[in-house]
Amino acid sequence: MAAPAVELAQGVFRIPTMGSFINSFALLDDDGAVTLIDCGLKRAPAKIVAGLAHIGRHPRDVTRIVLTHAHPDHAGGAAAMVDSTGVEGVEAHEADAEYLRTGTAPPRDISTTSGRLFQRMPESGFGVVPVAKELQDGDVVDAAGGLRVIHTPGHTPGHVSLMHESSGVLITGDSIFNIASRRSWPLAAFCTSFDQSKATAGVLADLEFDVAAFTHGPEIRDRAREQIRLFLRTKAQRA
């Protein structure tokens, strides 16, 4: 059985909410405050609370919730976590903020067959999520020494990756999947622009990091930057 929380670096933890298939993350400040990143599906809060307990923290210790983007497997548990922590709302990129506030999904990529199909299907939404702060590319969130916002749109208009430079942990969000430890693109059916999502992921190759963490899949600790750069370079050559 997987541990309720997995330490990626000092003060940085992955919280599995559906095995390693869907992950949230927790960053600890020196004063014990917690920044929570992504909130999984609607049923994820129980796993998040268990993960916090595993590292000696309680929902009341959470002072900030950051979402990488407005999809149900990232924002589904957000409203419940806002309620249980008492924070004013989540922090998310400005281009996804209105989707969260209204509980509506970003558009699909109708240039793809799967995108056109899913665009016509009823959306399993995530409910209305209050947004306390809108983020922009390059912002540094005041969390555990600084969490840099990297706008990587395409999966959604406001999708972001997050770089915790003091620990060397990169959280890719859905720019890159690592399900079963195999790097892949997100499914085109769930992207607003699949081509843009692939293109903007290229900025991750320019970052300096020691651990690559994914919302979908386990982290990479061994030669993480080299493995991410190899994935991106190989995919670019095949394009």
Image: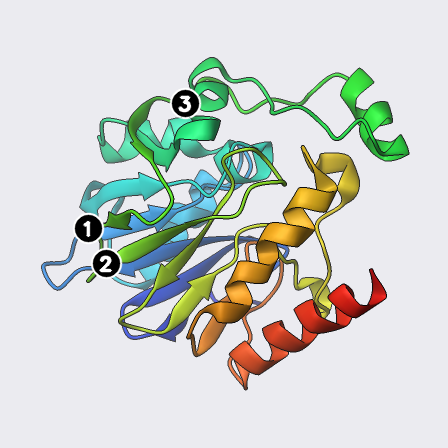
Q: Residues within 10 Å of mark 2 (few under 14, many from 20)?
A: some
Measured as percent of width and height from the top left, residue 238 is found at: 84, 66
Residue to which mark 1 is pinned: 142
Do tag 3 and tag 1 residues touch (Cβ < 8 Å)?
no
Position of 81 relative to 171 (above/below):
above
Position of 11 relative to 16 (above/below):
below
Of helix, strand and loop, which one carries label 3? loop
Residue to which mark 3 is pinned: 129
Q: Is residue 117 left or right of residue 48?
A: right
Which mark lies nearer to you, 2 or 3? 2
Measured as percent of width and height from the top left, residue 149 is found at: 37, 50
Residue 4 seen: no
Residue that appears at 34% across and 62% down: 54
For the N terminus, the image quarter is: bottom right
Residue to which mark 2 is pinned: 146
Measured as percent of width and height from the top left, residue 68 is found at: 46, 43
Of helix, strand and loop, which one carries label 2? loop
- The mark that comes first in sequence, 3 or 1, is 3
Question: Mark 1 is on which residue type?
Answer: Asp
Q: Is residue 128 left or right of residue 166?
A: right
Question: Mark 3 is on which residue type?
Answer: Val
Do tag 2 and tag 1 residues touch (Cβ < 8 Å)?
yes
- The mark that comes first in sequence, 2 or 3, is 3
Q: Residue 94 sits in which quadrant? A: top left
